Amino acid sequence: MDKKSLIGLGLIAGILGIWLYISGPSKETIARNKAVKDSIALVQQKQEAELMAKDAAVKKIADTLKETVVLNDSVKAVLANEQYKDFTPATIGKEETFTIENENIKATILNKGAQIIKVELKKYHRSGKTEPLILFDRDSLNFALKLNAYDRSRIFSTDSFYFKSAKQTATSIDLKLETSKPGSYIEFSYSIKPNEYMVNSEIRFVGMEKIISQTEDQLQLAWGMLYPSQEKYIKKEKQAATIYFKQTINDPDYINAIKDEQKELSEADIKWVSFKQQYFNSTIIAANAFAKGGSFIKTSGRPNSTEIVKAVSSELGIPYQHLPSEKFAYKFYFGPNDYKTLKAYGDDLEQIIPTGWSIFSYINKWMVIPLFDSLSSMNMGIVILILTLIVKILLLPIAYKTYMSGARMRVLKPETDALNAKFEKNADPMKKQQEQMALYRKAGVNPLSGCFPLLLQFPILIALFAFLPAAVELRQQNFLWATDLSTYDTVWDFGYVPFINWAYGDHVSLFALLMFVSTLVYTYMNSSMMPQQNNQMPGMKFMMYFMPVIFLAVMNDYAAGLSWYYFLANMFTFLQNWIMKKVISDTKIRAELEANMKKPAKVSNFQKKLEDMAKQRQQLNKK
């Protein structure tokens, strides 16, 4: 660094020193600053003292609040005692569960409300599961006895109170709702016998005559449930789930499964109410009867739910006579919709199973159900094959008459063709019909004789259509490619397609497809055997081929076991007709008809009426 630079830096340092000295605070300023600093410190000390005082006040308030809470608990106790009165002791408790069980069911009972909150069916499983089927659980159930007490000034519900276990074994339990009055209580009792689906129950009232309102001659028992999905396809469950009920003077009745409805049961006292699912039910049955007053049942669908099938509820009257000690006995059925099991318990419980209307039901009751019971150890696909064979043997005389009618019409084809040629130019349908009737009468052929035997088969078809989709025997029974004969089989799930989904579904059922193809073949064979009738009624021919298409749309979404039966029935029919064609000679039939045509014609009353009607119609046309 040179000399000039050093001199410059020295001058700058000197100037800065002089400037700092001149601009520094005076003694007065320093004294004033010190006073301000002391004042700030004093203020800070004051603020700290105020904060400490506030903390002390807060603590004092907190201590006061604690004393107030204790006081409020006392007030709450007084209020609770005023609200619940003699039931106050039962408002305090801890939830506990108890179980009773046998070989068939396991029932879980909650001490709060003394209600059965869960039932497991040990011999059944939910679709795709291995653990026992849960019929319902706590989240899907409510059960309570409603009490009008103290001249209707209070209404209590037993599911608000804690019961105490009075007596318990592996198959029974008594739960007691104690009041503050000595010797006054309500007791719920549950017990189950070996190998039963029935749980026996009693509600006992001891010393309650002065607590329960003197103006009441009955209490209300509320019972409701959300049906959980148990099956492979919830859609089919929703179509079957409903409530059945039986009143003392009527046959069992039900709410339509496709409706949401509340039904008042005021016509007569009620024997039982059944919460019916597709293959299982929960039913409450009175030893004598539930009182009709205020009793109702209600169903409510859950169309968008994939877990809940339907919501159901009921209220049933329980008679109460204000005696020092009285009881009301009833029982629960928790189990399958098995016809034999339900019928054994009596009270028309088996009528919750759809066996078909009127006379059709006897086909299922006398033939199908006994066959299923006797062959229950076999695969149900084979049992249905045996059923089809038995039905075909029973209907063999009808099948023979049907075949013979078609054969007679077939061998008369030369004569009917001649009539068609004769009236081809002379379009007089009435005259043609008269001559055809004369030909049939002369040959001894009744053109309707083939129709009546076919009509006699419909009761069996209708009966099976009602029962097989509801038969618990088919539930989860696999056969060939079907994993469950109680619902539809599927070999291709193609998903949602507009209109096709509505008309046909979102899948292809192979059993339904086989039934459809075999029905078309059967229809073709039938029409080829009776060409004369097809020529006379072209509209009927269209319907014969159109109906299998409609049937396919229905059966694609129906039980595979039923489609399997219809397919087998068609195949046995083919075999019968083939054997008859080999055994019965058309030449002999022709000779028989020719012999008849040589005899004097006999006119039946039915044929005479047909001819008279034809003549009258001809005369009207001429006018």
Image (spheres, grey):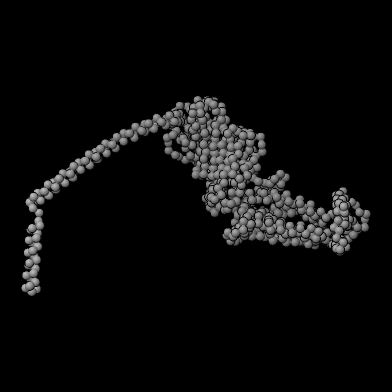
Q: Residue furthest bottom?
A: 2
Residue 294: x and y in percent read 58, 34
The answer to whether residue 578 is above or below residue 191 is below
User: Which residue is located at x 57 percent, y 46 percent?
Assistant: 301
Residue 381: x and y in percent read 65, 55
Q: Quadrant of residue 77?
A: top left
Residue 561: x and y in percent read 65, 54
Quadrant of the image containing the N terminus: bottom left
**Residue situated in front as seen by the camera: 214 or 399:** 214
Q: Does residue 613 appear left or right of residue 66 in this picture?
A: right
Q: Quadrant of residue 316?
A: top right
User: Which residue is located at x 89 percent, y 56 percent?
Assistant: 438
* Residue 481 visible somewhere in the drawing: no
Residue 552: x and y in percent read 67, 57
User: Which residue is located at x 79 percent, y 59 percent?
Assistant: 534
Total marks placed: 0
* Residue 295 visible somewhere in the drawing: yes
The answer to whether residue 304 is above or below residue 158 is below
**Residue situated in front as seen by the camera: 467 or 38:** 38
User: Which residue is located at x 42 percent, y 35 percent?
Assistant: 92
Q: Does residue 227 appear left or right of residue 356 in this picture?
A: left
The answer to whether residue 280 is above or below residue 496 is above
**Residue situated in front as seen by the camera: 49 or 210:** 49
